[in-house]
Image (spheres, rainbow, N blue to C red):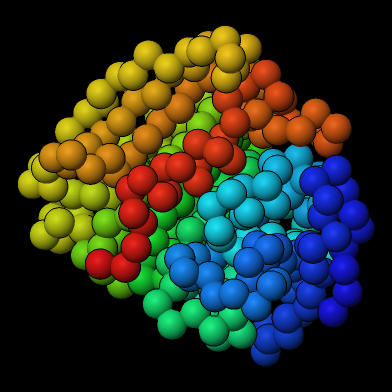
Amino acid sequence: MGLASVGREGLAQWEGRTFRTVLGEIRYSLYQPTQMRGGLPLETQTLALFLHGCNQTPVEFYQGARLAEKAEKFGVVVVVPHQRPGAHPEGCWNWYDPFNQTRYGVEPRMLQDLVTELVKSLGFEKPRIWIGGMSSGAAMANIMLSCFPETFVAGAFHSGLAYLAASSPISAVWSIGHGSTVPPEYSALSAFQCSGFQKVRRPVILIHGSEDQRVVPVHSEEITRQFQVLSDYTDDGFWNGSSGLRGPFLQSAYSPRESQYPYRIEDYRDQDKVWIRRISVDGLAHAWSGGDPAFPRTDERGPDFSQLAFEFWTETKGERQ
C-alpha cells in the first residue's frame, strides 16, 4: 500500500492500494474521511464507488471531480478503481463487451469482489454502497447497478450510456455518436434479467451536456427511459404501468451563483420520492460539470455534479430495502 500524490484538495489522504482476486489484480485509490482516520466510527457506513472515463487517470478524475471534498462533507468513504493496464488502449472500461454486461464478466466481477473486500476491511455491518462514473465509467456503473442491485443502492451517471447500448467495439463507436443500438425498453428488460429478476428499485441521478459530441445527449434520454421501465419491472415483474412512477416534473434551476450554464432538472417520482433525476446542461461538452479547472475533462461553468449527486443520494436515502 502506498500514498497517492498530493493534489490541490490536500489529497495526502488518498491511498493507492492493490486488490488481488482469482481474476487478476486491480489497483484503486481510497479516501477515508477525517473522522475515520481519527479512529471514530463512520455512522453512515457509506461507500461511494466512482469509475473514471477514457483517456483519464484516476488522479485526474478524483481531483477534477473534487471527490475528497465531498467525502469529508458527507462522511462517506470514496473508492476510485483503476482500469487495468492493457485492458483497453484508451483506458476505458469495456462496457460494450457482452461478457462484461453480465454478473460474471471480468470487470463486473472484479469490481463486485473489490466492494465485498472493502466492506469487510472497513468493518461496515450494514453498508450503503453508491456507484457513479463518467463516460465509459458511467456506462460500467449502469451495468453494476443494473446487475447487482443487491449491492449498490443508488447510481449517478455523468455523460453515460444505457445498459446494452452496444455489444462490440464497432457498435460502441456508432453508439456513442448516435444513440443506443437497442431500444431502452429492451435495456430495461435485460437489466432486470441480469439482476436475476430482483424486485428492487434503485434511485439514479444523471447529467448530460447539450454540446457533448463524444457521447451525444440522446443517451441521457435513453438512460432515463431504461430506469422508467426497469422501475415498472421491479414492481411486480411485468412492464404494465403499475409502478406508480410519474414524470417528468420540471424544475427551473438556473442560478448565476451556481452555474454559468443554464440547466434544468427533471424528476420522476412515485408519490413523494424521487427515483430518477435527470439534469440537462446547455453549453456543457464532454467534461465533468462543476469540476476543478486545473484538471482535464472538467468544466467549472456547469453545476457541481458531485455535490448534486451526493445530495441526491442522501436525500433519497438510497439504502437496502
Q: Quadrant of residue 208?
A: top right
Q: Is residue 100 visible?
A: no
Residue at the right extreme?
A: 5
Residue 231 position within the rendered picture, expressed as x and y whole percent measured from the top left: 24, 49
- Say which of 311 and 65 sits in front: 311
Query: What residue is shown at x 82% (from left), y 69% (from top)?
Result: 16
Left or right relative to 83: residue 270: left
Camera-side residue of 101 and 247: 247
Q: Is residue 157 left or right of residue 241?
A: right
Quarter of the image for the N terminus: give it: bottom right
Q: Quadrant of residue 32?
A: bottom right
For residue 29, above or below residue 66: below
Residue 57 vertical position relative to residue 78 in the rendered view, above or below? above
Question: Residue at 54% of width from left, 75% of height from top?
Answer: 41
Q: Give the percent coordinates (x, y) of residue 74.
A: 54, 52
x and y, in percent, of residue 247 in the image? 22, 28
Whether residue 119 appears in this view of the structure is yes
Q: Position of residue 73 (x, y in %)?
A: 59, 49
Identify the residue at horizontal 73%, vertical 81% (top origin).
Answer: 19
Q: Closest to the observer: 321 or 258? A: 258
Number of numbered discs on residues: 0
Q: Quadrant of residue 318?
A: bottom left
Q: Quadrant of the C terminus?
A: bottom left
Left or right for 19, reference 102: right
